[in-house]
Image (cartoon, coloured by chain):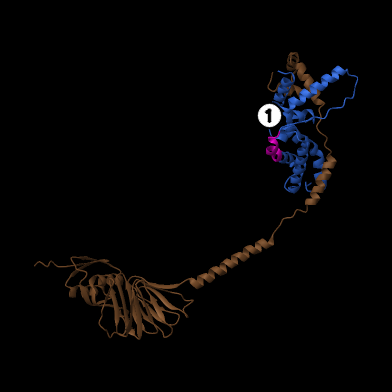
Chain colours: A blue, B brown
Amino acid sequence: MSNVCEDQVYSSIFRANSKTLFNFIYYKFGNEEKAHDAVQEAFVKLWENCSKVEPKKAKSYLYTVANNMYLNVLKAEKVRLKYAQTPKEHSNESPEFLLEEKEYKKKLDNALNSLPENQRTTFLLNRIDGKKYAEIAEMEGVSVKAIEKRMHLALKSLREKIDGI
Amino acid sequence: MQDNYLAKWLNDELSEEELAKFKSSEEYASYKKLKGVSASLKAPDFDVEIALNELQTKRSQQSPKVIALNPYKKFLRIAAAIVILITGSYLYLNFSNTSYSSELAENTEVVLPDNSEVILNADSKVTFNEKNWDTNRKVNLRGEAFFKVAKGKKFTVETTQGSVSVLGTQFNVENRDGFFEVNCYEGLVQVEYKNIKKQLPAGTSFLVLDGKVLDVEESSALEPSWTRSESSFEGIPLKFVFKELERQFDISVNTENVDTNLLFTGTFSNTDLKMALKSIATPSRIKFKNEGDNVLFYAENTNQ
């Protein structure tokens, strides 16, 4: 049976999970540097316990470790997320439209920053990383129902904030 | 509309009916835009390969994982335990005293390290330091004991009331409540009682009753009577006689209408209680009753 202690298995777990793990922490706390450190630390922990963690369980182990590590440290810090702008492929839009679009994204950024951490994480994991609700539920260690609820509330308050209700 | 319909809609899980209803609502346009724009969001760049490299360097710096066994610490622990053990036993052997004692109604014979003999009368105790015996022949005495001291350096008997020191001789020391008596049977002993220093040649005694030093006649006995299972008294108040009786037979003595300060001269057996009681009662002209471990001495009605 394959073992997490084997370099190949370990590397493939890293390749499969590190990006999403990074995003997961970033969405929660909005600090790129710390999200980076969290990924490193979570994987170091996994290596230290590689003989105890089955490859199947490695993913949820990583999320648990990362979560615990930064839960208390970063909770107090103010979230300042910045989302890389998607470069416009087609520039045949009118300047008014582009300006409007820019304004909208600014509003969205602000609205996202003011969301509760768990709603923001759920929303962005789905929108940016294309994760299914079931997958997000596994990462967060809650039920799918709870994720749906978070998603619903996230959409609702985002719209309210953007439309200025 | 079902619960969390916004989440369902985003996941394309709404029924056609629900979808139609949602589409007709005024906020639908806003949600649609939100859905579209949020799909174009991006997270910060994260280069998996660079991160993996970084991790592997970190790992190689850390590994092999070293568990400090610290054998020195373990050694220190054992060493400390040994030191404590050695010091403890040294102190114990050096400063602990050997003691022998006799219970009520029992005599005990003790041979000291220099072959001096000590015979303990009932309810008595001697304590001495075996380790220093060669340089310091000293015993502490509670109760009464007869000493046959081997010749040698000064031999001292310490009591709560006074001390007795000798070179080599036979003598008896009795140290009871209100009663301190030294009888010398052979050689010469020196008694220190408060400020009094007195040398006792063979055949003489030193007696203190309730703090008063009394003169005692010389006796020709070679050893105290109690070593032959008898208790002898020469003009001793009855209360001390009763105390001795209690010790010898492990009984309790009560009196009624008896003057316990009356002096008693005589001997009682330490083995036969009936005889002993008669020996005390008859010359003192009192009566006694004996029930189990209780003895009552009482006076006859004198108003005849």
User: Mark 1: which secondary structure?
Assistant: helix
Report whether residue B124 is seen: yes
Is residue A73 within the magenta segment? yes
* Residue found at x 16% / y 72%: B285
Could you say where residue B129 lies in the image, as x and y percent from the top left? 46, 75
Could you say where residue B248 lies in the image, as x and y percent from the top left? 30, 72
Q: Quadrant of residue A115?
A: top right
| Front residue (pair A3, B115) | B115
| Chain at numbered mark 1 | A
Give left or right: position of B218 versus B94.
left
User: Are there few (<14), some (14-19), or many (20+) residues within 10 Å of tag 1?
Assistant: few
State the extent of the magenta-drawn residues as a range.
A67-77
Task: Judge whether A98 appears above or below B185 on screen.
Answer: above
Q: In the image, what residue type sits under mark 1? A: Ala
* Residue found at x 81% / y 38%: A16
Could you say where residue B276 lies in the image, as x and y percent from the top left? 24, 74
Q: Name the residue tied to disc 1.
A: A146
| Front residue (pair B136, B222) | B136
Q: Which part of the image, by quadrant, shows the N terminus of chain B?
A: top right
Task: Judge whether B83 appears above or below B221 on screen.
Answer: above
Give left or right: position of B85 versus B294.
right
Is residue B8 within the magenta segment? no
